[in-house]
Image (cartoon, rainbow, N blue to C red):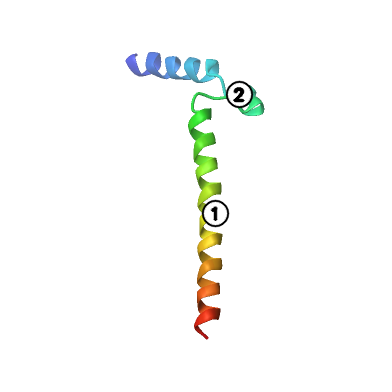
Amino acid sequence: MFKAILCSAVIVLAACTDTGDDAGLQGNHVWKTQTDMLDKAREVEGILLEGSQEQRRLIDEQAR
């Protein structure tokens, strides 16, 4: 009996839960500011890596 009640409760909660489709379309969610900052950090990391690779290339050319 307890298992049936528990299963029913889980099914009802799952059916009533928002899937987040609306939030995904708008791009708004609880951690939006944090994910935006992570995206910016990844962009900066890429720029720094490109700069260091260019610097290594220039040092190698000068060493020859």
Seen at 54% across and 73% down, the residue is: 57
- Residue sitting nearer the eye, 51 or 12: 51
- Alpha carbon of mark 2 to alpha carbon of mark 1: how far? 29 Å
Q: Please tell me which of labels 2 and 1 falls first in the chain.
A: 2
Observer-nearest of 45 and 32: 45
The residue lying furthest to the left in this view is 2
Q: Is residue 48 left or right of residue 23?
A: left
Rendered residue at 50%/75% (across/down): 59
Which type of secondary structure does the marked residue at label 2 adopt? helix
Q: Position of residue 37 (x, y in %)?
A: 50, 36
Q: Residue at x 50, y 63 (%)?
A: 52
**Residue type marked 2:** Ala
Quarter containing the N terminus: top left
x, y percent for residue 61: 55, 80
- What amino acid does circle 1 point to? Gly
What SS does tag 1 mark? helix
* Residue drawn at x 64%, y 22% as measured from the top left: 22
Position of 20 with respect to 25 (left or right) is left
> Residue 48: where, in percent of width, then height?
51, 56
Q: Which residue is mark 2?
A: 23
Q: How many marks?
A: 2
Q: Which residue is mark 1?
A: 46
Give residue 28's quadrant in the image: top right
